Amino acid sequence: MEKNSRPRIAIDAMGGDFGPRVMVPGALQAAKSQDIALLFVGDQEILESELAQHNLNDLEVDIVHAGDVAGMADKPSHILRRKKDTSIQVAFKLAKEQEADGVVSAGHTGVTLACGMFALGRIKGIERPGLATIMPRENKPLVIIDVGANVDSKPRHLVQFAIMAESLAANVLKTQEPQIGILSIGEEQGKGNVQVNEAHGLLARTSMNFVGNVEGRDLFHGDVDIVVCDGFVGNVVLKLSEGLGSAFSNMLRTELGQGFWAKLGSFLALPALKRFRRRLDYEEYGGAPLLGLNGASFVCHGSAGIRSIQSTVKMAGTYIKNRANDDIRSGLEAHPEISRFHRLKHILHTPSGKGSNQNDEPED
């Protein structure tokens, strides 16, 4: 699609814990505030019934029937081999056939990744798609990648994650020259495991604004805009952050309800507490972009509410309008040294930063 033209987004309306009851109103609210066309994919009768409850004036909305649903217990291999008409597969088929510019789903993340890879493939030069998340902070949001798409990653994959996240930050968050760090156990170069140290060497050789190692304690109050890590570590960070936020809110609510003075204080502080809660609200940024596919794909939490779906669809629209994938391709072209076709050891140890034997086979 042309830059800034109206994006058409396929909505996997049957995915997630609540299906059309959340996916439909959330997507419609996004379309009302942003110039987006919607393709709701799922059971036609159910979707027609749900859409009949909403005002569709001035909205471009269509239904594409899908006769099956990918459940949270379904394995990706089972979906690809045995189920051919699930709503997520039909949504990606629309994207493959260029009937849609992107896909939004609240279904099984692994199934979404597998179906997206099968239908769209990867951007040339990307070996592993990465799942990014945008986390709220005191001064500005933070992008973390990967948060679960790959539990094992090679150092060069982390550089590819950084290139993809740089495009996300620039095109969606409007961050100019984002600072990029790699998550480690110490700020000093050399701290961390083999993967982190080798990725550090690769990132330092790029033209990206790489600032070095970042410790976990600095994630929420540091200056870095992007943090890269493998999906195992990233998923732990994400789930820990969600759990801490929930626990903190519950403890605060309990303490503010203890006695007359606490209740009075909470009443007086209510406006500030509401602002504080909004700043910590993950639904402000919605779901996670699945970066690296040859198309746009966004994954919401299975329990996502209407506001989270709305935020995700709006983010998808912005990502598509600004042709963020083109920036990823440009970034890869600017850094051929991290391609899979150059041996990692040659990149790290030759003065030029490139392998001395251009005919080397790819390293697994």
Image: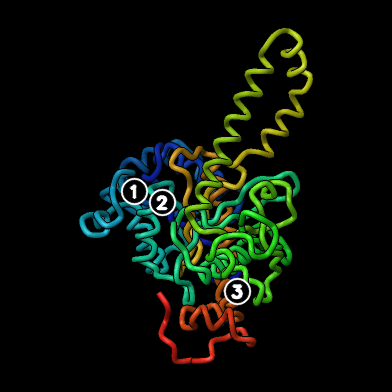
Judge whether 334 appears above or below 292 on screen: below
What crowding class fits label 2: few (fewer than 14 Cα within 10 Å), some (14-19), or many (20 or more)? many
Mark closer to the chain start, 2 or 3: 2
Q: Which residue corresponds to mark 1?
A: 42
**SS under mark 2:** helix
Numbered label attached to residue 202: 3
Q: Which amino acid type is shown beneath numbered disc 1?
A: Gly
Numbered label attached to residue 294: none
Judge whether 221 appears above or below 119 on screen: above
What crowding class fits label 3: few (fewer than 14 Cα within 10 Å), some (14-19), or many (20 or more)? many
Would you say 56 lies left or right of 261 here? left
Q: Which amino acid type is shown beneath numbered disc 3?
A: Leu
Q: Which residue corresponds to mark 2?
A: 109
Q: Position of residue 116 (x, y in %)?
A: 39, 62
Distance in Å between CA atoms under marks 2 and 1: 18 Å
Distance in Å between CA atoms under marks 2 and 3: 29 Å
Q: How is the image coloured?
A: rainbow
Distance in Å between CA atoms under marks 3 and 1: 44 Å
